[in-house]
Image (spheres, grey):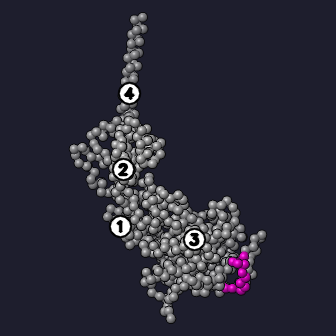
Amino acid sequence: MKNWRINIIFLCILLFGAAIIGRLFYLQVIKYDYYKALAYGQQKDFKFLKGERGQIFFKSGQTLATNIKGKYVFASPVKIKNKEETAKNLSEILNIDENQILESLNKESSFEIIKNNLTSEEETKIKNKNLEGVYLDNNILRKYPQKEIASRTIGFLGANGKGQYGVEGYYDEILRGKDFFPKKERYGISIYDDELKNLKGADIYLTLDYNIQVIAEKLLEKAKEDIDIEGGLIIVMEPSTGKILALANFPNFDPNNYSKVKDFEIFQNDAVQKLFEPGSLFKVITMAAALNEGKITPQTKYIDNGYVKIGKYTIYNYNQKVWGEKTMTEVLQNSINTGAIFAERKLGHENFLKYVEKFGFFKPTGIDIFGEIYSENKEFKKGYEVNFATASFGQGIEITPIQLVKAFSAIANNGKMVKPHIAEKIYKNGKTEEVLNKVDDNEIISLDTVSQITTMMVNVVENSYSGHAKIPGYYIAGKTGTAQIPYSSLGINMRGYSEKTWQSFIGFAPAFNPKFLVLVKLDNPKTKDASQSAVPIFRDLAKYIIDYFEIPPDYEVE
């Protein structure tokens, strides 16, 4: 009996000791970091610092993206007793979901950002509430002084502090400042002063020319008024370097108020994130390839009967017109579909496929804008006769506008393609890094081919409906393109093509010593074809650039 009592007492002592040891283990091991932070916080002040985000500038220094001081609200959940009530109050003031706030407050943390960029009204209400464990502090907010100008090229800084779309998205890590928790003794001084100087992100100077960008955007806005375009795009590139001088989209948005945008598709940059069928613009590529392989000359003749029959398919010219005997120069001048099919057949399907790949249509360009896409063109690559025929004049093959501009740079740059880019200089910690111009070492087409196809494109401007692109004193090389829009591109689950059209014009000047290359692409303008819509826009912009750059004329005007 005596031994039984002793055993009971001993067992109780063991259980009590185990409980104490378990509690000590929980506090000193499992919760070590938590209680260490609490204790350390009584001896030192912690203040979260975020390095200032780098700024973005036009080539000539006008500011596209900068930073201003603002207020944000954060909470210290470990100091909040009634978290449900605090979450409810903050939800009413900030118009944020109560459960979302409560999720942050339930974390075992000393620092949780609740909302950035407070309005003065929100700031006042939070001060008046005097909520336990809720604090206000200064932070740096993103500001876009140019508002809508180049907005779909620049992108914006999201609420999560990450760059979204455009330049902001592509160069986010370079622009982003470093995060830092400097420790400051209550009765001492900061020991991190030197490190704080290096928190700022890099500044980026773009290749965009402010004046050309503004004119391009105004021309698109005018096109909306005059011919009711549903959307539009203009790309201006320096063909010898790949520098993008203007990249204008329509419509635009104000990145200062991006959260108010309902249609997120407007955030995308059509130059790199939308596919389209180029239509007759592609006839230039087909002709250049056939010329380069020596399968045709500009004077090669063929007889047009108005259509080409391939199995169960019959392919017609525009308006089912019959042209009779024509040269390849006249095929390009009059944009004859059957003539493009003739040139492709002379070239051969295998060679045609090889040149489409050489011109870069099966891979991204690598331009420094967020979210570039491309099409593998799987249907075209299947090798069906009808697919090669329609692709020769730009239907049934899908590309991005920036791919087309890069491909045409080979014609405007003596046979070698350039890599399009939009950043010119990156400035970090007092040092400037130049973004190098990249030219393809491989010759896509020969100098003889360049001369021939350029002359043919000049003939298009001089002697066809594209004559609206003419500028007295200057030789302009160019080509129109009108293509029906597939139902699939309109988000309609149907095969075939709608009645809507893409109308485009691509050209460069001066034709035999190009200083700029321009693509104008319009979505479903209320005009018959590109000669009435895209061509006048090209002419107005090209005339402005010629005067702006003070380019000497090719010949005297009588």
Nearer the observer, 271 or 142: 142
Q: Residue at x 36, y 46 (%)?
A: 126
| Residue annotated with mark 1 | 432
**Distance CA(mark 1)–CA(mark 4):** 58 Å
Type of amino acid under label 1: Thr
Per the image, label 1 sits on a secondary structure element best described as strand
**Distance CA(mark 2)–CA(mark 1):** 39 Å
**Distance CA(mark 3)–CA(mark 2):** 43 Å
Indicate yes or no whether the magenta region holds residue 444: no
Q: Closer to the N terminus: mark 3 or mark 1?
A: 3
- Please identify, in this view, whether the residue under mark 2 or under mark 1 is nearer the observer: 2
- Please identify, in this view, whether the residue under mark 1 or under mark 4 is nearer the observer: 4
401 to 18, vertically: above or below: below
187 to 455, vertically: above or below: above
* Circle 3 crowding by C-alpha within 10 Å: few under 14, some 14–19, many from 20: many
The circle on residue 123 is 2
299 to 80, vertically: above or below: below
Residue 344 image position (x, y, % from top left):
67, 76
Q: Residue at x 44, y 83 (%)?
A: 547
Type of amino acid under label 4: Arg
**Distance CA(mark 3)–CA(mark 1):** 41 Å
**Distance CA(mark 2)–CA(mark 4):** 43 Å
Q: Closer to the N terminus: mark 4 or mark 3?
A: 4
Labelled pair 4, 3 in contact (Cβ < 8 Å): no
198 to 188, vertically: above or below: below
Per the image, label 2 sits on a secondary structure element best described as helix
- In this picture, which residue range is highlighted in magenta? 316-327
Per the image, label 4 sits on a secondary structure element best described as helix
| Residue annotated with mark 4 | 23
Type of amino acid under label 2: Glu
Q: Residue at x 41, y 44 (%)?
A: 90
